[in-house]
Image (cartoon, grey):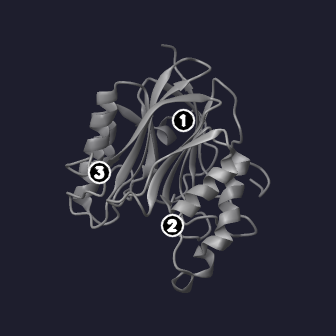
Amino acid sequence: MTDATPLIGPTEAPELHVMTYNIRRRMPRLTSRAVDQWDRRRPLVQRVLEQERPSILAVQEALPDQSAAVHEALGSSFEAMGFGRDADRGGERVMLFVDRSRYAVRHWTQIALSDTPDVAGSRSWGNRIPRTAVIAELTDHATSRELTVISTHFDHISRRSRQRSAELIARRVLELGRPAIVMGDTNTDVDTVPYRTILDEGSLVDAWETAEEHLTHSWSTFSNYRPPAPGKRIDWLLVSAGAFEVVSAGINAVRYGGAAPSDHEPVQAVLRFTNP
């Protein structure tokens, strides 16, 4: 893939192009490496989004100005959903961006990954910082099919928090009772207990594992700005078993002039609803 060639690019109905992308939060300039500085990375992240044009995008680690930059790249047809993880709804956030020309947003909410999910900023399971998920209920204009989309970010330290977060997300998927797409940075590899839990208890499958076509190698989704290499897939794109055909999937390790837009690679898939 060249710098100018999208991995997937825009798709038309009935295909759904979905992406999850940890864009790496902006850090203070004096404490970040040159490759990590947001003012250098912002045009690269925007270029990825302008080339790929997913119709549903899950984003992690966005500060308010970074969320605005993502929205700018996607365009005015997209609705942005999500707010800061702190008790005052400020700070770093998980986001969902949905193309309203393709989907009607019936309802969305944000929950804390805790024993009190409706309490903003709450923590329960050993994570030192609040963790969240954004949940949107959509209708696909082309097919009139309803679906649930979830963007989330599990804790990077607490194993217990990651496990309980997987259990909570799985319960929400089943409670909502519609075909679901669950995306995010889980800070744990596949074939771990949280991975098996969310698949089994949420009746989900891994889009990478079930794709009819792999568009890339099985790159590590956390490169830390290094060249792409095989490794752990800690950024997951999961879909309800039997509800979607996974046409293709890829881990987009694009570099622009050798520079990585983020320390994570975006994970993408093209989906189609199966027959009702």
| Residue 157 rendering spot, x and y as whole percentages | 30, 66
**Eyeballing the image, is 215 above or below 201?**
below
Q: Kindly identify the residue that appears in the image at 64 percent across and 66 percent down.
A: 260
Q: Which residue is mark 1?
A: 211
The amino acid sitting under disc 3 is Leu
Residue nearest the observer in this picture, 82 or 40: 82
What is the crowding at mark 1: few (fewer than 14 residues within 10 Å), some, or many (at least 20)?
A: some
Q: Are marks 1 and 2 in contact (CB under 8 Å)?
A: no
Which label lies toward us, 1 or 3?
3
Q: How many numbered discs, if any?
A: 3
Determine whether, in the image, residue 83 is placed left or right of residue 213. left
What residue is disc 3 on? 113
Q: Residues within 10 Å of mark 3 (few under 14, many from 20)?
A: many
Of 12 and 118, the residue lying toward us: 118
Task: Decide: is 189 above or below 197.
Answer: below
* Label 2 CA crowd tier, 10 Å (few <14, some 14–19, many 20+): some
Q: Of marks 1 and 3, which one's residue comes earlier in the chain?
A: 3
Q: Check disc 2 and give the amino acid type.
A: Arg
Please tell me which residue lies in front, 106 or 113. Answer: 106
Residue pointed to by mark 2: 25
Image location (x, y in percent) of residue 93: 45, 57
Residue located 57% across and 53% down the image: 266
CA distance for labels 2 and 3? 20 Å
Q: Is residue 119 found left or right of 250 in the rendered image?
A: left
Marks 1 and 2 sit apart, C-alpha to C-alpha, by 30 Å
Depth-wise, is mark 1 or mark 2 nearer the camera?
2
Q: Is residue 9 visible?
A: yes
Query: What x and y, as percent, mark residue 96?
Result: 51, 45
- Within the image, what quadrant is residue 126 found in? bottom left
- The local secondary structure at tag 2 comes to loop
Q: Residue at x 46, y 27 (%)?
A: 147
